[in-house]
Amino acid sequence: MAAKIKFKRIGKKKKPSYRVVILDEASATKGRTIDEVGFYNPQSEPKFEFNKEKVLSWISKGAKPTESVRVILGRAGILPAISFEGKKKRAPKQKGEAAVEGAAAAAPAPAAPAAEAKK
């Protein structure tokens, strides 16, 4: 049985909070949990709390954290912090008129008719 350390979303609509749980790798995120090792609430201070001994014992048993959980564990000081300096940032999305203006600026201007060019 391969175990994963994942977020399990709880809370109200548009007010998320997450439990950090140990799940079987094949089970669904909302499936049956093996153990609960922490809590993460992005809208409050402090944002996260973990049972460090449980997390380290599960990692020593072979449980692998997902990428998002790995980042939070790094910020909590349980695992070494991850550096994002070498990663490429994605371009922001363009919405509404900005997208139309950006497309118009990228398109080449139409050529002038030959008759008007000779005048």
Image (spheres, helix red, strand yellow):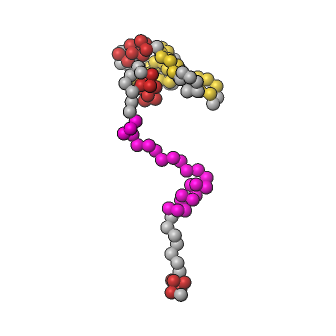
Q: Nearer the viewer, residue 60 or 77?
A: 77
The structure residue drawn at horizontal position 51% and vertical position 46%, both measured from the top left corner, is: 92
x, y percentage for residue 79? 38, 22
Q: Can residue 4 be seen in this view?
A: no
Magenta segment range?
84-106
Quadrant where the N terminus sits is top left
Q: Is residue 92 above or below residue 109?
A: above
Q: Residue furthest right?
A: 13
* Residue 85 covered by magenta stretch: yes
Q: Is residue 48 toward the left or the right of residue 87 in the image? A: right
Place residue 63 in its image quadrant: top left
x, y percentage for residue 43? 58, 27
x, y percentage for residue 91? 48, 47
Q: In this view, does 105 lie above or below 64?
A: below
Q: How many labels does the image show?
A: 0
Q: Can residue 6 be seen in this view?
A: yes
Q: Nearer the viewer, residue 115 or 76?
A: 76
Place residue 80 in its image quadrant: top left
x, y percentage for residue 97? 61, 55
Q: Which residue lies furthest to the bottom in this view?
A: 119
